[in-house]
Amino acid sequence: MTEKALRLGTRRSKLAMAQSGHVADAVRQLTGRTVELVEITTYGDTSREHLAQIGGTGVFVAALRDALLAGEVDFAVHSLKDLPTAQHPELTLAAIPRREDPRDVLVAREGVTLDTLPAGARVGTGSPRRMAQLNAYARSHGLTIETVPIRGNIDTRVGYVRKGELDAVVLAAAGLNRIGGTEELTGSLSADPLSVDAVLPAPGQGALAVECLASNADLVAALAELDDPYTRVAVTAERTLLAALEAGCSAPVGALADLLADGPGHGSHEQAVTEMRLRGVVGTTDGSTLVQLSTTGPVPTSHDEAVALGRELADEMLAKGAAGLMGERAL
């Protein structure tokens, strides 16, 4: 008797379908079972309010989790940065696959970079984190830009630049890569990766989360084959920092854990990884004040060690005044 198909819950967006399709292919190869995508609409997909207004934490995942708990799907794929930092008691993060490029990119007219934006350039982003760091960078480099809050999928956001309504938009490199967007931009537009020294990404950016019922031991074990241990400890440290700062994902907080390796291919999984550097930033959305710190230590070998690294940096940031900045949200 043929095993019944596994049902994968996914948002309906072009990006979500691409991400879920990639995971579905990997699960088919691992298990030999058919995987069907079940499209689910979330509150974050239907609301037209800015994410900072609706409280970005969980708005893209709640409906998927409800479907899991109701037995309507067997597992779900999320963008990890959309997940609340507190784990649901009945669900488990069965896998965090190897991370895509965690950086942000500036999409603008061909050849235009952050440093060559025209005076008074209007830069669109729905992220207070990006606003804070872009405005801080502009202040320190003598640039005059206006950050404009926007919503919409990747095509909608890029369309603002194509139509000349904005000079640039800032997107996650991972999302653009997953839908093949960098190829589509050639010609009139281009994507300039932003250095993490200028703009730190959101905690967990570029990583996917594969979630299922904790009680489904067989499925948990099968999905665990997709897990990348280096990505897991890195994003655990980042998300612990976020949680310790008591910030939702709509707050202006950035974090990135770099895996440091010896020799050529610095930081790659193929090299001997020796240390992890965790960087964090929190600031006011106008860029007038940033608290940005980092810490480096041995690569965590367990969840608890990754958590300790995140808490250590959060404590240092709070001591430097981060707590006073957490209420600064973009409206």
Image (tube, helix red, strand yellow):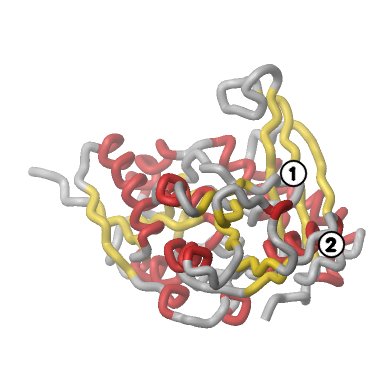
**Kind of residue sitting beneath label 1:** Leu
Q: Which numbered disc covers residue 238?
A: none
Residue at mark 2: 139
Above or below 33: residue 83: below
Q: Is residue 251 left or right of residue 96?
A: right
Residue drawn at 75 percent across, 31 percent down: 298
Q: What is the spatial separation of the Cα atoms under label 1 and label 2, in whole angstroms?
A: 25 Å
Q: For label 2, count other residues whose C-alpha is less than 10 Å away and answer few (under 14), some (14-19) or many (20+).
A: some
Name which quarter of the figure residue 265 lies in: top right
Q: Nearer the viewer, mark 1 or mark 2?
A: 2
- Closest to the observer, 3 or 250: 250
- Closest to the observer, 188 or 122: 188
**Kind of residue sitting beneath label 2:** Arg
Q: Which numbered disc covers residue 278?
A: 1
Q: For label 1, count other residues whose C-alpha is less than 10 Å away and answer few (under 14), some (14-19) or many (20+).
A: many
Helix, strand or loop at mark 1: strand
Q: Is residue 81 left or right of residue 23?
A: right
Q: Is residue 170 visible?
A: yes
Above or below 265: residue 86: below
- Closest to the observer, 311 or 81: 81
In the image, farthest residue toward the right: 320
Question: In the image, residue 61 lies at what x, y percent?
Answer: 46, 67
Residue drawn at 64 percent across, 38 percent down: 302
First in sequence: mark 1 vs mark 2: 2
Quadrant containing the C terminus is: bottom right
Quadrant containing the N terminus is: top left
In the image, farthest residue toward the left: 1
Question: In the image, residue 320 lies at what x, y percent?
Answer: 91, 59
- Closest to the observer, 135 or 323: 135
Helix, strand or loop at mark 2: helix
Q: Is residue 244 visible?
A: no
Residue drawn at 79 percent across, 57 percent down: 137
